[in-house]
Each structure stands twice: as structure tokens, then as C-alpha cells.
Amino acid sequence: MVMFKQKTIRTQVSCSGIGLHSGKKVQLALTPAPDHTGVVFRRVDLNYYPIKADIKYASRLSYATNLSRNGVSIATTEHLLGTLIGLGIDNLYVDIDAEEVPIMDGSASAFVYLINEAGVRFGDAEKKVLNILKPVHFAMGDRRVSIYPAENYQITYSIEFDHAVVGSQKKTIGFDGAATFENEISGARTFGFLKDVEMLRKNGLALGGSLDNAIVIDTDRVLNSYLRFKDEFVRHKILDVMGDLGLLGYSMRGHVVAHRAGHEIHAGLAKKLRDNQSAFEIVPISSLVQPAEQDGLEELVEVPSNY
């Protein structure tokens, strides 16, 4: 069945923007890639130097998820990687002429738009899934994240901030297709507190941040004109953990449960899971679908005419 095949995009698409932390202008192109490539960033300005989206290259995880290989870096990868997981894209070259992925509007909406504009192409090889077999936990103090066996990919995230605007938020999302990601998660923007801006910029961070690409929270209000969701803050954290766990290289079947976590905690779980071979299996996606379900899905899937 075509729906079980690996996916890339149909044609190259590109955009430009600025890096949230570097403040530098950047050109980014998404380029189709063959089966079994995975997601590979290529630094166009460094003779297309490749860095695969792999947890072993994760570095500098305080305010974003960065990748580093032999002294070459790609920064702030999480929103794009979360988009690829959410839309089920397995293979892609991400060609970039600077060190940081553009922040766009602070959400994943622009990346969803680009991929929809490019279209999807199915490959010949079957898609594989990382299927969780037993629970794995990672914690730092009261910040924690776990993953449990489940029948699909689910994320439960809770946040707690000692701030009247944010407070406590909790949300569970079950992902049963690209539409769930597009409608429920992709539009949620990154956020930060006005009181922290000076400190961040003194440390070379948030140099490209503005009301155009982040929700900025003052002592008693949001400085932006509106929120896209009443719980936009926790929805954005779900986007972040999707991107960070995407560094394992596969779509997942399991239930992620996170509390007051962040990039460093997410990456800690990914590394612990990677090193615990008995906790998961990598299996063809068709092996996780019952025959009766396959028959029903065949009727629902429209195969592209030029497939």
C-alpha cells in the first residue's frame, strides 16, 4: 500500500528569515531526498557540509535544540523537525546558508505551508516506526519526561509558571494524521518573558526575537495583540518535544508524558531510550496495522496520479 511507503517532498521549496538567537538572515531550502536518507541538514555556506538530524549530534540545549558535528553547527532545529514528524516526512535535505534555522513567526505554520506547497512523494521502501515496548523515564529535579507503550503517538504535556498569564496548563494530543498536527499544534508560537530579554541578549541569545516571532509576556499581560489558542503555551511545548524526539530518526508509537520539561530534558529521554535497546523496536509500519484496518484505510487513501 502506498500509504505505508516512506515520504519525501515532490519538489524543492525555499524561504528566508532570521535566526531567533543569532539575529542573522538565513536562506533555507527543503529538497527531496531518496529512501533511507532521513533528515539531513546541509550547510550551503560550508560546501554543503552535512549534519544528520540524530540525537548523537545534539548540543547546547538550554534555549533551543542545536546540532554539532566536527565544529559545524545547526541551531534551533526543533520547530522544523517537529513539523516533519507531524506531517510524516521521512527523508529530506534541509539546505541552509547560515548556522540557525529561521524562526519564521515562532511556530511551525510556515514549514507546514512550505511542505504543502511542495507536495508529498512516496518512495519505494516501507516506512519504519519506533515502537515503544516498555516505559523509559528521564528527570532532572522536578522536571521530567517519560514514554510508555501505546497504540498510537500521544503526547501529554503539563507546564507550571509562577505567572498569572501562563500559570498551569496541561494538554493531551493523539496524532492520527497530518491534520491533527496542522490544526492543533503547528500554529502555537514560542514564548518568553520580557524581564528575561536583557539577560538573554547579554548572553548572545534572542538577538532576532520580536513580537513578530514570539509571544512576549510582561508582568500581567501578553504584549502581542492576541493568542492563537487559550493554551498556546503548552501546545508549543508539544511542538518542541516532537522535534526533539524526532532526533531519534523515526516516527513513534508511544505515549510521551512531560512535566515542566524542556529541550535538555527531552534530549535526555531520547538518549536514554536510544541506549536502552530492549525498550523499543524498529518495525515496518504495516506490522502495526491490523488487516481489517488496512482494508478500510485503502478506501480512504487517494493515490497521486503520477505515483
Image: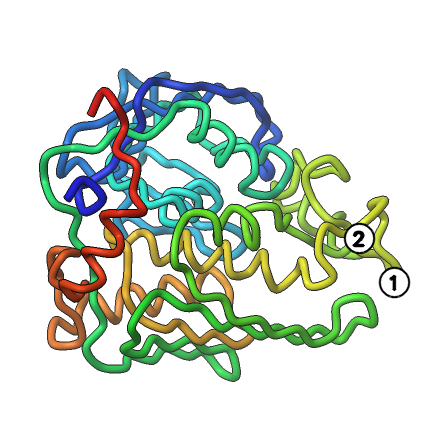
Q: Earlier in the sequence, mark 2 or mark 1?
A: 2
Residue 106 occupies which quadrant of the picture? top right
Say which quadrant the N terminus sits in. Answer: top left
Q: Which one is in front, 86 or 300?
A: 300
Total marks shown come to 2
Q: Are marks 2 and 1 in contact (CB under 8 Å)?
A: yes
Say which quadrant the C terminus sits in. Answer: top left
Left or right: 29 as drawn, with respect to 227: left
Which residue lies under the disc numbered 1? 219
Residue 227, given in percent of the width and then of the height, sits at 77, 52
Q: Is residue 193 above or below residue 67?
A: below
Q: Which one is in front, 88 or 47?
A: 88
Q: Is residue 73 above or below residue 219?
A: above
Whole-angstrom CA distance, mark 2 to mark 1, is: 8 Å
Q: Is residue 171 above or below residue 190?
A: below
Report the amino acid beneath label 2.
Leu
Residue 73, given in percent of the width and then of the height, sits at 37, 36
Circle number at residue 194? 2
Q: Which one is in front, 38 or 56?
A: 38
| Label 2 crowd (10 A; few <14 / some 14-19 / many >=20) | some
Residue 82, given in percent of the width and then of the height, sits at 43, 48
